[in-house]
Image (tube, coloured by chain):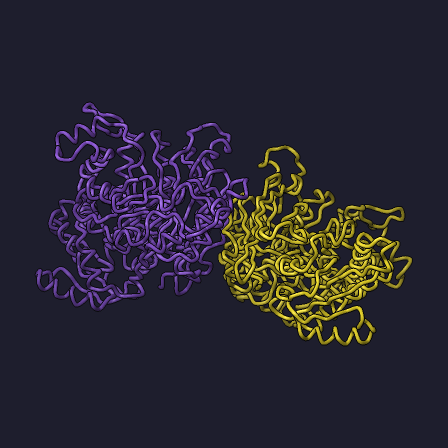
Chain colours: A purple, B yellow
Amino acid sequence: MPLGERTGDKSESRYCGVEIDFSDDMPRVLDFNLYSAGFDFVLAPLMDPSYRPSLVQKDSFGSGALPFAGSDLVLSPSQWSSHVVGKISSWIDLDSEDETIRIDSETTLKQEIAWASHLSLQACLLPTPKGTSCANYARCVNQILQGLNNMQLWLRIPLVKPDDDSMDAKAVTSGDSWETWNSFRLLCEHNSQLSVALDIMSTLPSANSIGRWFGESVRAAIVNTDCFLTNSRGNPSLCKRHQRLITGFFNHSIQIIISGKSVHPKASLDANASQDSIVADSQRHPLRPYLDYVGHLYQRMDPLPEQERFELGYRDFLQSPLQPLMDNLEAQTYETFEKDAVKYIQYQRAVSKALLDRVSDEEATAKAVVLMVVGAGRGPLVRASLQAAEETGRKLRVYAVEKNPNAVVTLHALIKLEGWEDTVTIVSSDMRHWNAPEKADVLVSELLGSFGDNELSPECLDGAQRFLKEDGISIPSSYTSFLQPVTASKLYNDVKAHKDLVHFETAYVVKIHNVARLAPCQSVFSFTHPKKSDKESNQRYKKLQFIIPNDTGSAMVHGFAGYFDATLYKDVHLGIEPSTATPNMFSWFAIFFPLRTPICVNPGSTLEVHFWRCCGSTKVWYEWCVASPSPSPIHNSNGRSYWVGL
Amino acid sequence: MPLGERTGDKSESRYCGVEIDFSDDMPRVLDFNLYSAGFDFVLAPLMDPSYRPSLVQKDSFGSGALPFAGSDLVLSPSQWSSHVVGKISSWIDLDSEDETIRIDSETTLKQEIAWASHLSLQACLLPTPKGTSCANYARCVNQILQGLNNMQLWLRIPLVKPDDDSMDAKAVTSGDSWETWNSFRLLCEHNSQLSVALDIMSTLPSANSIGRWFGESVRAAIVNTDCFLTNSRGNPSLCKRHQRLITGFFNHSIQIIISGKSVHPKASLDANASQDSIVADSQRHPLRPYLDYVGHLYQRMDPLPEQERFELGYRDFLQSPLQPLMDNLEAQTYETFEKDAVKYIQYQRAVSKALLDRVSDEEATAKAVVLMVVGAGRGPLVRASLQAAEETGRKLRVYAVEKNPNAVVTLHALIKLEGWEDTVTIVSSDMRHWNAPEKADVLVSELLGSFGDNELSPECLDGAQRFLKEDGISIPSSYTSFLQPVTASKLYNDVKAHKDLVHFETAYVVKIHNVARLAPCQSVFSFTHPKKSDKESNQRYKKLQFIIPNDTGSAMVHGFAGYFDATLYKDVHLGIEPSTATPNMFSWFAIFFPLRTPICVNPGSTLEVHFWRCCGSTKVWYEWCVASPSPSPIHNSNGRSYWVGL
């Protein structure tokens, strides 16, 4: 039964499993662990652990039946597939020096996977690679993956990394189990059916080191009873760091599996005595107290905020960025964005401050400020501006310039409804071509994309600046894009699934969730309005150098998460750069720039990245590359894959 | 006029160029350098070196004509394209800290390339990147390459690498100009129109370090007059190392370009006085003595051996390996292989030794040896065996087993023609299925591919071993494959041109020439015949560790060159492994296993490679991967791309 209910959260991490020993009586196994004890699934060996193909062949192989854990008929198909994760024989060692062991291991692995496929299990757990080398194991698993249907293979990896701060890079990395995973998955070419089950130990590595795993494809965390402390009542509990880790797993859809022997026998007895006296001691599941504790951690989590719940379905889902200049937005899109109250409050604050600066209290009744909303859409910025005028007691003459004729229809209706006819003039035109009847004191626009300039705000405002007074004010007055390198295995695999170059050279809007942020953000491109000079180009070039913290260990960079921050006016800003993000604003997700080939970075090393903003006569595009530690191809040359139309 | 004639050699390296200063009188330039002095082409600046776009725009840009070296009409189209290599302005610096220089550089570069394309020049020389970073330069060149038709871009790279033997890897690599090239071409994604022009200095790096360049796409070597010494007669000459280098360039189709000022004025005068007194001193080309010396080096080269001349057309040309088991060979193929006298002499020697061991002199007249040629083809091994019998005075009973019915026709004719009817029995059958009427003393076969077992000799001989006596002899008695990592830019680009996975996971037979061998060969798979036990598998797995010499510097591994060596009988061997190759044998070229992504290896580092020979019920295939320094995907999983049919 699930650990608990969390409104809106349908993640897999509600289900908790238990690792068990080999048994050929699977119905009893399910009775005991699931129906009595309350676990949701078992991690169960599929084959008698004493089986070795090379020994069998010396005897007569009479019946021809392999020593599996019961026939397929002992459970129903849905029991097999929902309640059993297959545990591949842990003795197998495909990289043994001993050829017999190697060949026995390969034979057994293939037999067990074939059996698990026959049973339609959802996943099998592959034992941890035993030595430093795993190439033959990976070769065999890779062969299996080529022909596998839906089953997931979870490679068991202990969560260990020596926290050696010495500068000897070899010593630091040699004991890092992430390296084993990384080799294995590179050899298997990032296969999306290959993922990780982390073995949690009583000692945890550094937070940065653990953080890497949240960008990897981790499906399960196997928590050994050794990890648990004993609380004052003799019950198992976890220390704060372990608690935070488990909560992190819940938040990243990683399932918990309890493993090991009960080391809290008193707890079992207590629980038994107090709660469930009907069940005899001998039948009481020894790991039930651990399950109860994990359930307690689950139920103790804060409920998801409404906005987060709304955005759950967008997590790590790649969307193509809008092209609001080339395409006209749809009503639904306006509807969504207009709901973002926080954004319009910031605009209203910025306009208020600008009006107060522009018109002194003495002039307030006499002087009307000419304010133009360029890209007025269905009117939210017109409303915010009028509210600012009311708030500050300033007079406005507003022009609402909008190129989308469909939005203009709504604008007309709005103005009539609100009785703004005397104040607001609607202009159905592209701001780049409109001949304004007078010049503006204040230009208000919201043309920003997730990466700031990526919806061509600079080019549009270049056009609008023609009708801004010399000393006029642009709101926003500037904006800057930001980038940081991320591990984002899921995003990478989704891009790769398209099997073409175009998708690897496209930036995506995405609510990033299962990612590891490998270094703090750095600023990329800045634009200031109004421009000092007409000749100032909108092309940009920036070299960025990110330093990977020493205690992270090596990590994989699948691409870059991008954000923006905009200064609307003076101290009023608005943005999504994580360290300064405007709270509760939901109009923008991050942007993701993928790398065609993920790049492995070492602890303490510098990741040098180059980004270009290029402008042609009909389009604007980005190019990007990694220059160090090893150069990547230049992505999106000439905007061949991804561009924004002018 | 070409440097000389070398029979059969039509390589580009016959042509020698000269680097000149900017001139707007191109007809005079050609008169002076080509028609008078004898150079074949000029490396000439296309644009006035004082031009800077940012300065022009401040003046009025009245005429609109850029300061190019003459209009397209001053030379004929064929003069422009055959006699002029464009030299891009050497002041450009796209990675300057100064934005004006950066933008001027990009503008000029694009203008000059556009002009060169307009003139249909065959190549342009790009100046050496100025700093340690070249990302913006590469980005711009990469943009140009996307739209370039046939023109080659030669990146000028000085041939320098500090010979620092310290273990400080950074110090060793920082001054290595190969690193600059490597970054640039990685950023430009191995574009095949981007190649190298090496600037030769008076000091040369180590031989291993120079060797790398012969696997790269080097089109020209610019030899400065500074490199030349003065011989006893006051003429320019080169030291031995430089001479060998120039000869190496000739052998690898790399054109020489003479550059710099004459530092041997006496030589010019002498030459003038003695040979060509009509030409006035002032008209005599100051670099003519250098051209004469280079011509002398060219003419002094040994003529190409006949076999090399025959194989010129096969150099670095990828061929799919034969599938002689699945497909029947054609007459032409038999014809070619049968011409390889050396091979059959080795077989005859091996059979002779085996016959002498098998039958003592006393038994020679009484005892007939049963010798079976399995895979007899059109009979060359039958002939070699009979000659061995004659030579040793032993009696033979020969069975010639051949599965190709077309070859059997020829076999019958041969036996009739030679009168071998009493000795030789022809068997039209696949050796794996033939029921032999008696058992053989000696089994003779030649089923070897370039990689030894890759034409399935092991599987065929498994079948034939049924009719070999317990103490019988197999010729060959064993064979071993060998591998070494290579830089092979041309092969890589040819594989890549197919734009699919299949070609990257296929092994090719190829006469490798423009490659750099980065480490000595290591043995891979060995097979011994007859097998000790029926159960012995033909699957193989080998882990190889190649160490890159410290003085090589970093290098790019595009794949692996493979060879074989076979022991026919006792000390009689036959093979193509370079260090022990059988001289003058031409039946086998090397085999080439590509890597999907070339891997950069550092000096002194270990390149760990895994190779598998996998056997299925209908096919045999190889899988391979790099495990270190960074894991590659496993190539050809399950033989999905490349396999040999059983």
Could you say which quadrant of the image residue B162 lies in? top right
- Rendering coords of residue A93 (x, y %): 47, 42
Q: In the image, is A30 to the left or to the right of B471?
A: left
Horizontal and vertical percent for residue B208?
69, 44
Is residue B38 visible in the rendered image? The answer is no
Q: Residue furthest top?
A: A232
On the image, the x and y values in percent for residue A456 come to: 33, 58
Q: Is residue A36 left or right of residue B165?
A: left
Quarter that holds the C terminus of chain A = bottom left
From the image, which quarter does the N terminus of chain A lie in?
top left
Image-based side of B379 in relation to A344, left or right: right
Q: Residue at x 37, y 32 (%)?
A: A205
> Toward which corner of the image does residue B43 lie, by quadrant?
bottom right
Q: Where is residue A645 in the image (x, y as percent from the top left)?
A: 36, 64
Q: Foreground residue, B59 or A62?
A: A62
Front one among A586 and A613 = A586
Give the vertical position of B635 relative to B549 (above or below): below
Question: Can see residue A418?
Answer: yes
Q: How many labels does the image show?
A: 0
Q: Which of B334 and B577 is in front in this view?
A: B334
Task: Identify the image quadrant of residue B348.
Answer: bottom right
Q: Is residue A58 left or right of residue B602?
A: left
Q: Is B646 placed above or below A115 here?
A: below
Residue that extends furthest to the right in the rendered view of this protein: B274
